[in-house]
Amino acid sequence: MDFHRCIGCRFCMAACPYGSRSFNFRDPRPFIKEQDPAFPTRSKGVVEKCNFCAERLAVGKQPACVEASGGALVFGDMDDPASEVREVLSKNFTIRRKQGLGTGPMVFYIV
């Protein structure tokens, strides 16, 4: 999803099987205390969804929600058998939303 190319038609909201997209009715800039020049802010009239902070991942950082969670959220490489996320998943019962749709969701919820 490219926030900066979005024309605000909201067809992607209707098509999203997870209901995870939202329309930005207000300009978010007045509510941002510190703007990061490495990641431009979005404008009013676009659809948004979590991209797991792709701009932070590109420079080797964790998503902001993982950093702020104090260990409650875990993010990592599922292809690495020695990663923390694989260890957590092997020790806990988890569910994934709407697997039957064939979209291959990789967000796991510990129950």
Image (cartoon, grey):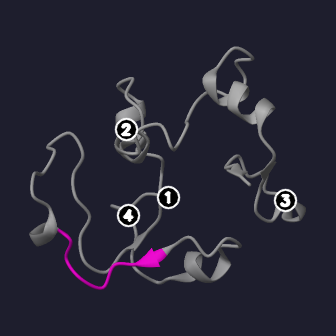
Specify the segment rendered in magenta. Answer: 22-28
Q: CA distance from mark 2 to mark 4?
A: 28 Å
Question: Do the residues under discs 4 and 1 have CB atoms within 8 angstroms?
Answer: no
From this view, report whether residue 61 is shown above or below residue 28.
above
Q: Residue 34 versus residue 108: which sits nearer the camera?
A: 108
Image location of residue 56, percent across then percent down: 35, 35
Element type at mark 2: helix
Q: Residue 90 versus residue 17: which sits nearer the camera?
A: 90
Q: Closer to us: mark 2 or mark 1? A: 2
Instruction: Read off the residue under disc 2.
Output: 67
Q: Closer to us: mark 2 or mark 4? A: 2
Q: Closer to us: mark 3 or mark 4? A: 3
Element type at mark 3: helix
Mark 2 crowd level (few <14, some 14–19, many ≥20, 10 Å Cα): some
Q: Residue 99 versus residue 65: which sits nearer the camera?
A: 65
Q: Quadrant of residue 68?
A: top left
Instruction: Read off the residue under disc 1.
Output: 1
- The structure residue drawn at horizontal position 62% and vertical position 83%, both measured from the top left corner, is 14
Q: CA distance from mark 4 to mark 1?
A: 9 Å
Image location of residue 49, percent across then percent down: 47, 64
Instruction: Read off the residue under disc 3.
Output: 99
Q: Looking at the picture, which amino acid does disc 2 mark?
A: Glu
